[in-house]
Amino acid sequence: MRPLLALVRVTATFITMFVFLAHMSVVWLVFRERWRRVRWSNRLLGLYSRWGLWLLKVKVKPIGMENLADLRGGLYVGNHLTYMDMLAISSIVPACFVTSHEIKEAPLLGQVCQMAGCLFVERRNKLNIHNEISEIREGLQVGLNVAIFPEATSTNGEQILRFRRPLFIAAIDSGRPVIPFCLNYQKVGGEPITIRTRDMIFWYGDMAFAPHIWALASSGGVEVDLHFLKPIATYLEMDATALAEQSQRAVEAVFKPVKKNEGSLLMDEPSLEIQEV
């Protein structure tokens, strides 16, 4: 029965992606002004995210919603484990995500990200960073929520990598607050996540998308806590490196690394790899 349900969920997920693209095409035709179009794309992404999470049996528990009260746009920064992170965040807060040009070039996933109003950074070419910061700053100035994963990659859940500083400059230049967030995936199939089961959820290294979403749909359900932490006010004289470090410390304070199975050895598992998202 479980393989049949997984097939239904995966099929419905891909159908949802195509319907989303069709819906977004209408939005792009109706709204010619860029940031207005992005704002509407973000709102609709939230609706589709909630539907997608329901299809894949992913339950998101938001924690710290009081920290978002009275906020009118800010730079959301946090840890990154899988493509499901974007759906989890969008289901709670309409956000414009910043991702890589590698994802933009990926079949289907790239088209979905473009239509969802994502901003793209070229990590292979450092010379364009000023233009990318300018785009993010402009989005923040018009009151959008912009979400970035400053580790610059997804991980296997053992640790949080160093937060990269450049994109924090956009928050400083625009005077918008930084809102740290932390994703803790708690259970899969009703059991606590371990290094033996994490690959059904976390997407990193050279994992292929289709087999991974099949494993996720077959997992029996996922539970994730999404912590929104206290906003950090910014000012023009602020140091971007210090801001990145402060944000990382806030996330690390509530992050729960993946635990080993009893009797298992961490060295038996593959070494930490990365997945550009």
Image (cartoon, grey):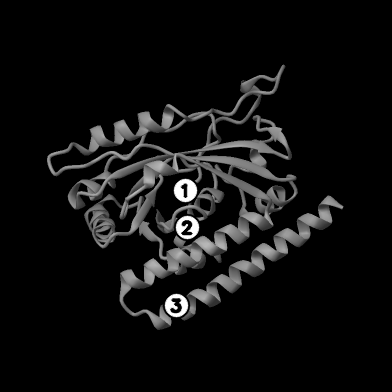
Are discs 1 and 2 less than 8 Å apart at CB?
yes
Circle 3 is placed at which residue position? 27
Q: Which mark is residue 244?
A: none
Residue lying at the far left in this picture: please name it: 237
Q: CA distance from mark 2 to mark 3?
A: 22 Å
Residue 247 spot, x, y in % from top left: 33, 35
Residue type for callout 3: Val
Where does the image place residue 165, in percent across and percent down from the top left? 28, 40
Q: What kind of element bears circle 3?
A: helix
**Disc 1 residue type?**
Glu
Callout 2: SS: helix
Label 2–label 3 contact, CB within 8 A: no
Kindly identify which residue carries mark 1: 276
Q: Gap in Å between the C-alphas at discs 1 and 3?
A: 28 Å
Q: In the picture shown, does residue 224 fall above or below 195?
A: below
Q: Position of residue 125 (x, y in %)?
A: 31, 53
Question: Disc 2 designates what residue?
Answer: 103
